Amino acid sequence: MRYSVGIIGLGMIGAKYDLEDPDYEEPLTHLSSFYRNQNFKLEFIHDKSEKIKDLIKNKYHDINFVQFLEDASPGTEIIVIATEASGRYKLVKKILSIFSPRVILIEKPVANSIDETLKIFNICNKKKINVLINFPRSHHPETKAIKRIISQRKPSCVTGYLSLTGDIFHNGIHFLDLINTLLGKVSNIIKHDTHYELILNNGTIIFKHLSSNFKYSNFSGKFFFDDFSVSFPSNSKNQFYDISKSTSSLAYKGYIELKYENFNKPFVSRRQGDVVDSLVNFLNNGDNENFISSEEYINLVSLFLDVLDDKE
């Protein structure tokens, strides 16, 4: 069975990452990921800009670009929202006046305020529409392997650091989600003059925002456990995990597991195809393990917004 998909918003994550780097093997955007996946039929794409239409048509000759959403098939099952965060509630109301989708896959942040985010969740919940939020890093096989090994080792404590460039809110919540996925729930965030302190049930992660003057986000960091560590140094858009050996046979076994599974290699942190694979599992089996729930998302964003101010 093939599921019909419509993509609204053809900016960087919508389409442009792949257009700017056409020779890269892995799909970086919604457009490329759904276009390549045999489980989906790309029903339509839409953007306010006519300029992007010509760029896309040069690469994808058989895609239905609609100028008005009203011209798209109302039976489209999956709607992807990859527009800017401002005005999202208004857009969602318009979408639901035209379509009755099974799933809305929406880019983070869902909206620019908690109030607007709650309105989006509530209107979709009333219509029994699943809202899935796009945090790609939690869907990567590498992340799942690291999570499994941490879970198997059951470390008693964790410390570490994480540094980030780019917009602190839009990009920072990516890494809060990653920490939640790998290490457990962040229960509190304490703001200091030079950094943030992320409080976990069994440890603390130091989070530093280096600069906003970057088009893309880069991050690097390292987590230290009882007898092993996990690092992810940044190298442009190629970012990778590495689990370090130690004298402990337990930690060494974890290192060998990653080597054996071939996850100790570079991967693209924005790789969108893994999210689409998770979406297939959700549609076929109801498995939403890799997607953050609306409640978890609200808690995560609320924590972060509470410590941000206008100076960031």
Image (spheres, rainbow, N blue to C red):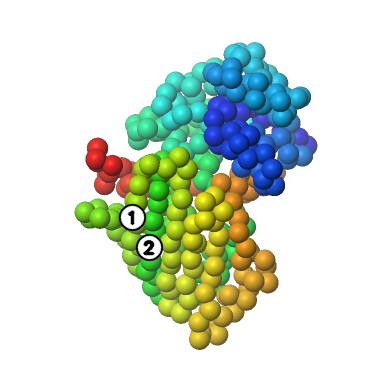
- Quadrant showing the C terminus: top left
**242 left or right, relative to 31:** left
- Amino acid beneath label 1: Lys
Of callouts 2 and 1, which one flags the residue occurring earlier in the amino acid sequence?
A: 2
Q: Position of residue 296 (x, y in %)?
A: 43, 47
**Nearest to the observer: residue 290 or residue 305:** 305
Please give the name of the residue rendered at 71% of the width and 35% of the height, measured from the top-left corner.
35
Q: Is residue 248 above or below residue 170?
A: below
Question: CB of mark 2 within 8 Å of CB of mark 1?
Answer: yes
Please give the name of the residue rendered at 45% of the width and 40% of the height, measured from the top-left corner.
215
Where residue 132 sits, quadrant-wise, is: top right
Label 1: which residue?
208
Label 2: which residue?
161
Is the residue marked by circle 1 packed among few (<14), some (14-19), or many (20+) residues within 10 Å?
A: many
Q: Is residue 201 above or below residue 211?
A: below
Please give the name of the residue rendered at 59% of the width and 13% of the height, measured from the top-left corner.
68
